[in-house]
Image: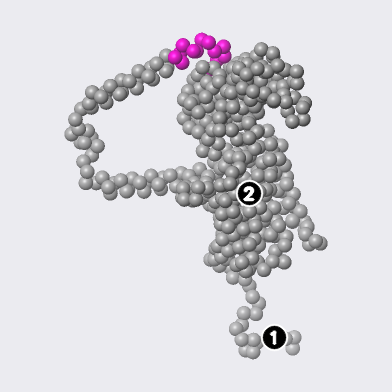
Amino acid sequence: MTGRINKTLGLLIGAYLLVFLQSHWQGPRLWLGFQPDLTPALLVCAGLTLGAGHVSTSAMLTGLWLDSLSANPLGLSVLPLFIAGWAVFTFRDLIMRGELVAQFYLGTAAGAAVPLLQVWLLWLLGAAPLFGWEMGVWWLINALFCGVAVPVFARLAKLLDRWFSHPIHDQNRWPNENRQIVRGKH
Amino acid sequence: MKRFFYKSQQTAVGAVLLTVFLLLVMPESARARLKSAIGGLFLPLVGISTTGQVAFESIAQLGATNSEPSPTNQAFGQAPPSLSVLQEEVDRLRSVNKHLSKLLALEPLIPWETKLVRVVGRDPFNWWRRIRINLGSNKGIRSNQPVISAKGDLVGRVSVVGPLTSWVVLVGDPNCRFSALIKESRSQGGIVSPRQFNSDLRTVELTYLPNDVELRPGQAVVTSGLGGGFPKEIPVGQVVDSWLSKDGLYVEARIKLHANLNQLETVRVLTRY
């Protein structure tokens, strides 16, 4: 239970800090000309390692936080983020999720899909976002950033897990099985 | 596929879909309030980062100016301002005086009760179509109150009200649609934002005009008062050109707004209309 709470708390605090940094840290905007959005990478990470509840909670809260600090209609980002996280969660048993390359591809795919879904939803809601070639380049770079961010987030999550959670209980922790005293019935 | 939906997974998907649905059907004003409340969750972090930045800057300044004399001593040592500086100050005050006198003279021409407010900012995410004014709920500003220019031309409506300042969404933004009519023929239509990006931000589109309407460039367009959001007969702009819609069911027209939305310094909020 404690481990689960730790993971949930860690995920939500991470999402909160990530959204805040994305909106208030002007460095990337000055250097790249746009503000990278790494929240799809976070959802991919949650989908790879955590449960259904974690994916839905983080998608809802991250989406709402993101929209509250942007010009998006409130709730617009929830569904795209959830779809990205849920797709990874559903098929994660079929993916070599520990592999760096797999994580990179998943992050890139999610980083590319989420903005497209957001634009599609905006169209459905009757908004007319402006487009240009520059935006296409930004979209690609952002997808690559998400690809890079997934392995980073995964390693960070492992590190935090090691720091703040109890080690997994292993019934047979004796280093050498030959010297272990096994008590039988008689 | 059998494992696709456990009960906990059903709950998770259901919760997300329900949240999205509720947010989409929520009235716009409630959504705006919720958005600002959720955004408020970041205030502690904003405070910490601002305080840290200020502290860092003041420490840096302290290090840089430690050996220099204090500003008061510096002022004593300075020569009195030159005649040209004083003349510039007089010119500035004269232009401010002239501007305020003009605004006062325009006051009796506007038939509604208004509050004169200053434009103090623009929305970085929606630069051309959203401005911030210097009055909020503490001075009786309410959501959806119409906003007109100092001369009386339509500018937009109040979208979000804070305690000290408010946001105004300008005409041409998708969130500021309203019913308008051609002043001569009294034909009614709806003002919408331009469908494609237009470098002239003063141009908007008037749609759903009847097929038999006679439109000429230069005809005046005013608010129709339908819906109650805006009072009747606020000047909006004039017709530039018109065309039949793609499906041939109605006529559309391009309207040039009277108010220059990029030169707004003072605007009026209609408090009683």
Residue drawn at x 56%, y 47% is A134
Q: Residues within 10 Å of mark 2 (few under 14, many from 20)?
A: some
| Span of residues in magenta | B102-115
Question: Which residue is painted at 49% across and 50% down in the image?
Answer: A32
Can the viewer see residue B147?
Answer: no
Q: Position of residue A107 (x, y in %)?
A: 62, 59
Q: Nearer the viewer, residue A162 or B75?
A: B75
Q: CA distance from mark 2 to mark 1?
A: 60 Å
Front: mark 2 or 1: 2
B118 left or right of A124? Answer: left
Nearer to us in this view, B268 or A49 = B268
Can the viewer see residue B151 in this picture?
yes
Specify whether B262 is left or right of B146: left
Q: Which residue is mark 2?
A: A115
Question: Which amino acid, by three-letter code, is at mark 2?
Answer: Pro
Residue B152 position by quadrant: top right
Helix, strand or loop at mark 2:
helix
Residue topped by disc 1: A183
Which residue is found at the position 32% from the left and 48% from the top? B59
Question: What's the residue at 19%, 30% (across, down)?
Answer: B79
